[in-house]
Image: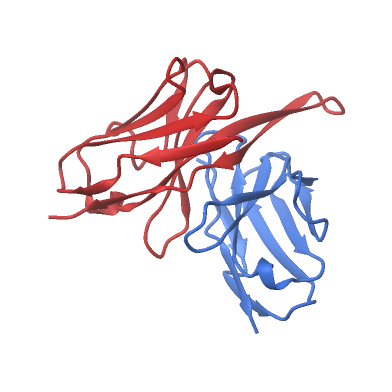
Chain colours: A blue, B red
Amino acid sequence: DIQMTQSPSSLSASVGDRVTITCRASRTVSTYVNWYQKKPGKAPKLLIYAASSLQSGVPSRFSGSGSGTDFTLTISSLQPEDFATYYCQQNYGTPFSFGPGTKVDIK
Amino acid sequence: QVQLVESGGGVVQPGRSLRLSCAASGFTFSTFGMHWVRQAPGKGLEWVAVTWSDGSNTYYADSVKGRFTISRDNSKNTLYLQMDTLRAEDTAVYYCARDHGYYDSSDYSTYYYMDVWGTGTTVTVSS
């Protein structure tokens, strides 16, 4: 099975900050990585698919990069509505695993 | 509009069974694969199971294999999750999600992602 790890597990940031979250797969997953945003009491929301493609309707301040085993989600200028938990997920092979999440909260 | 609505959650004793449903609307259900994903209290997202658009293939997380069964009725636009021999650790909010495929002609690959999600149904396993 492919294990996904994320760092950091949490971070505190201010509105306007640039935020970078890292995700690592236990073996190569090519670019079969998606990123989701999760807020308490809400359904997960797709942000990035295929490692770097921005989902329709998602603000351009979100971007993704990486291939193989190392991936990054970047928020170029953090907005108040971005405080949430972010998850990477691989769909290279079953079971389709999620990372443990990175919680972004207000500094 | 495109929508997924889960139902069937509740409180159940350990060892008992429960069946969740996910009603789809606003899109051609029979042409999309479907997932179940869960989130236990205070924990992260956990992928549970997937079924192909025609139900011909199903895959499960190790934690539920042999106890849970994903199925679908395309004539009713409905996805199911039959959960047997429930354990306390199955307590979670369960989400259904649509599996969308994107073909990238630059590398001849098809990428899949969960683009539409329901609002979730809560399952509590407790005596």
- Give the mark count: 0
Q: From the viewer's perspective, is A81 left or right of B41? A: right
From what the image shows, is residue B42 above or below residue A52?
A: below
Q: Residue furthest right?
A: B106
Give percent across and percent down for residue A84.
60, 66
Report the residue at 55% width, 54% height from top. Answer: A99
Question: Which sits in the foreground, A39 or A69?
Answer: A39
Q: Quadrant where the N terminus of chain B lies? A: top right
Question: Which sits in the foreground, B54 or A91?
Answer: B54
Report the residue at 50% width, 37% height from top. Answer: B4
Report the residue at 15% width, 42% height from top. Answer: B15
From what the image shows, is residue B79 above or below residue B122?
A: above
Give percent across and percent down for residue B81.
35, 33
Q: From the viewer's perspective, is A97 left or right of B60? A: right
Give percent across and percent down for residue B35.
49, 35
Q: Residue furthest left?
A: B127
Q: From the viewer's perspective, is A28 left or right of B97? A: right
Report the residue at 65% width, 84% height from top. Answer: A107
Q: From the viewer's perspective, is A25 left or right of B61? A: right
From what the image shows, is residue A60 above or below residue B105?
A: below
Give percent across and percent down for residue A50.
73, 40
Image-quadrant location for residue A9: bottom right
Q: Quadrant where the C terminus of chain B lies? A: bottom left
Image-quadrant location for residue B117: top right
Question: Which sits in the foreground, B28 or A2?
Answer: B28
